[in-house]
Amino acid sequence: MKLILMKRALLIVIGLLLTLLINGCARSMEVDIDDLLSSPQSYQGEEICTEGVYASGLEINALGASTYQRGDAVYLTEPVIWLERAEIRSSTDCFSSTTTPPVEFCKVTVCGLFEFGANYGHVGAYDYQLRGANY
C-alpha cells in the first residue's frame, strides 16, 4: 500500500514538473513592436513575440513596423530588426517588390529571443535581432 502511494505521489510530481516545463517553454511575452523598439533594454534576452512587416530576399531577413515607398521601391521603416532563424508563427498579406532582386513583404507574427546592443545581420547593419531559440 505504501509503495502504491509513493508511486502515485511520484507520478503527480512528475506531471506537475512536466506541466511547468512545457508551459514555461511554450510561452513567449507578446510585445508591441513600437514598445519593443522604444525601450529595447526592457526586453533584452527575453523570449518575445511581436507583429510587424517581414521583408525577405537577397541579403535581407528583417522586421519593421511598416513600409514606405520611394519611387518604385518599397522599404521597411526604421528601426529594423534582423531575424536570425526566428519563428514566424503567422504570415498574411504578402506581396513582392518590382525591384531587382525582388523582396517579399508580409505581415507576420514572429517569435524569438530579443537581443540588442551589437551589430547583427548582413554586414552588421542591424542594431536589433530576434533569433530562434535553437540557434
Image (cartoon, rainbow, N blue to C red):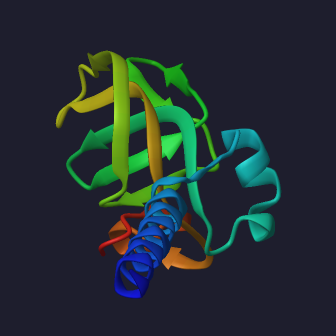
The answer to whether 54 appears left or right of 65 in the picture is left
Picture quarter containing residue 64?
Answer: top right
- Check the image and report above or below for 20 versus 76: below
- Answer whether residue 76 is visible to the viewer in this image: no
Q: Nearer the viewer, residue 89 or 70?
A: 89
Q: Nearer the viewer, residue 89 or 130?
A: 89
- Check the image and report above or below for 101 versus 49: above
Q: How far across and down, in percent of the image, does residue 48 sit?
A: 58, 55
The answer to whether 51 appears left or right of 31 in the picture is left
Count every numbered label the image shows and give the total: 0
Q: Nearer the viewer, residue 128 or 97?
A: 128
Q: How far across and down, in percent of the image, does residue 74 sit?
A: 43, 25
- Answer whether residue 60 is visible to the viewer in this image: yes
Quadrant occupied by the N terminus = bottom left
Residue at x 57% of width, y 42% of height: 50
Picture quarter containing residue 118?
Answer: bottom right
Residue at x 54% of width, y 53% of height: 27
- Check the image and report above or below for 59 versus 14: above
Picture quarter containing residue 134?
Answer: bottom left
The answer to whether 12 appears left or right of 132 in the picture is right
The answer to whether 35 appears left or right of 134 in the picture is right
Q: How far across and down, in percent of the image, does residue 127 sit?
A: 59, 68
Q: How far across and down, in percent of the image, does residue 108 sit?
A: 43, 31
Quadrant occupied by the C terminus = bottom left
Q: Nearer the viewer, residue 70 or 132?
A: 132
Residue at x 26% of width, y 55% of height: 59
Residue at x 45% of width, y 18% of height: 71
